[in-house]
Image (spheres, coloured by chain):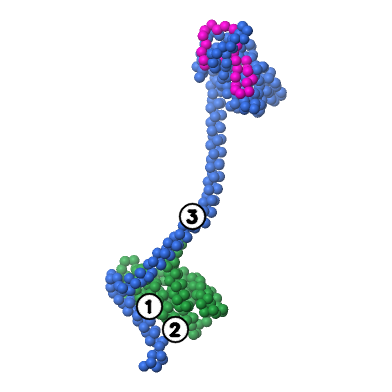
Amino acid sequence: MREFLQRHRAAILAFFGLTLPLFLLFVHGRHPRKTTVIEVALMEITGPVQEAASRALSGISDLWNGYVALTDVHDDNERLLEDVRQLTEKADRVRQLELENAELRKMLDFKKRRRELVTVGAHIIGKDVSAYTRVLRIAIDVGDDASVLEGMPVINADGLIGRIHRVSSSFAEVMLVVDARSTVNVKVSGKGVVGTVTGTNSQYSYDARMSYLTKAEPLAQGDLLVTSGHDKVFPPDLRVGYIRSLEERQRGVEYELQVTPAVNFSDLDLVYVVTDVVSEPVEGGDDAARRDQP
Amino acid sequence: MRSAAIILVGFLLLALESPLLYDAGMAQYVPDLVLVMTVYLGLTSSFGRGLGIALVLGLLKDGFASGTPVGMYAEIGAIAFLVSFRLSRRLVLRGPVGAMLVSLVFSIGASIVELVLSLVFVRSFGQGSSGPGLVLASMLPQALVTAPFGVVVFWLLDRLDALTTRKNDSVFL
């Protein structure tokens, strides 16, 4: 018997190796809905290992997605940052165009109202700025070639900026109304008070002062000062500034009041040089000036 | 030692196979790693020990596989072992191409055996989405997926043999 088993060992093993699974298959294939002991045992063996493997791979996957695969996120980030930069640039350009457009519209309205003024448009090409970022002097890109002469008024839609101080063939320098050398004959809009606005050359702010002899009517804070035209330099009814405070200071026979200029000198871009005044009635005159009062 | 190491490797491969392939988006065609291991055993092991390991690995695969009755992969493993063991006396396998070819042929053979066994023993075979059509349709893709893994598994077991039996020469690669 032992000799038989040894001689046919391979065949016997093969027989059992083939029939045992077939028996299992027969049993489990016939009654697929009943859970057998063998199935339970296999589940007990494989379940925990499968769960651990799944968790381990999930952890590796999370690590990969969270860190290693972030190279794509870095590229995306670079691309998005570039997009943001370009869009910001575009938005800034649009904002700039909007501001320029608004300024041009304002100037167009002004020119419609003041048709008697012959003007030459100019860009600011240089600003002398004080240590306190206050603009002291500006240079513009028109000169002799455009019939610009010394003393000509320089304006924008907000009002009087100053006058041409020096001029070359293609450029000119403007003396601002806040310059201490600048004097402008003014009147208080709607009131019978005339005087002179002189710059203070303050380092800290755009200031001017108005000197006058007498006042026919009481003045108020915020009263508008416009050019009177008496000096024959500035056409009448150009806005010059507003009375800042009613604290009068007496200097000899004159009284002085603090004035805030009508123009924001820090934000100048386009200006107009008044080269001539043709005889045409001013639309509205003082009333128009009063309408523009803030 | 060698048997335990092979069973452990097979167990780990089975455990990792499913979630790994699912993550890689290859869950549809799963390479039959246990089959390749069984073929390797048939080509390199002694009869009794190799058959025993093949049965254990087949049963483990039955435990991991869902939808097939217990005994199916044990039977396929036993048949694959016997065939490869018979072939080992006539077949000299060298290089990765050989490993791939053997894996491809055995995978197709295993699918045919699975089809026959399912038709004979599995009552529910053919109901729902399972059936002969599905087995036949996935036969070649599965074999093509298994073939390259054959090289990897053969190399892995070859290294394992070198480690556990202290042999330095490589049988296949």
In the rendered image, residue A221 lying in the magenta stretch gets the answer: yes
Compared with A278, A264 (above or below) is below
The answer to whether marks 2 and 1 sit on the same chain is yes
Circle 3 residues within 10 Å: few <14, some 14–19, many ≥20: few
State whether discs 2 and 3 lie on one chain. no
Amino acid, disc 2? Phe
Q: CA distance from mark 2 to mark 3?
A: 49 Å
Tell me which chain the residue with mark 1 is part of. Answer: B
Residue found at the very far right of the displayed protein:
A168
Q: Which residue is mark 3?
A: A66
Magenta segment range? A198-226
Where disc 1 sits, the SS reads helix
Quick one: which chain is green? Answer: B
Q: Which colour represents chain A?
A: blue
Residue A179 on image: x %, y %: 64, 19
Category of crowding for the residue at label 1, using alpha-carbon neighbours closer than 10 angstroms: few (below 14), some (14–19), many (at least 20): many
Drawn side of residue B133 relative to residue A248, left or right: left
Q: Residue at coordinates 54% horizontally, 34% vertically from top-left?
A: A94
- Give the alpha-carbon distance from disc 1 to disc 3, as whole Å: 43 Å
Residue wearing tag 2: B47
User: Which mark identifies residue B75?
Assistant: 1
Depicted A193 relative to depicted A10: above or below: above
Discs 1 and 3 share one subunit: no
**Main SS type for the magenta part?**
loop
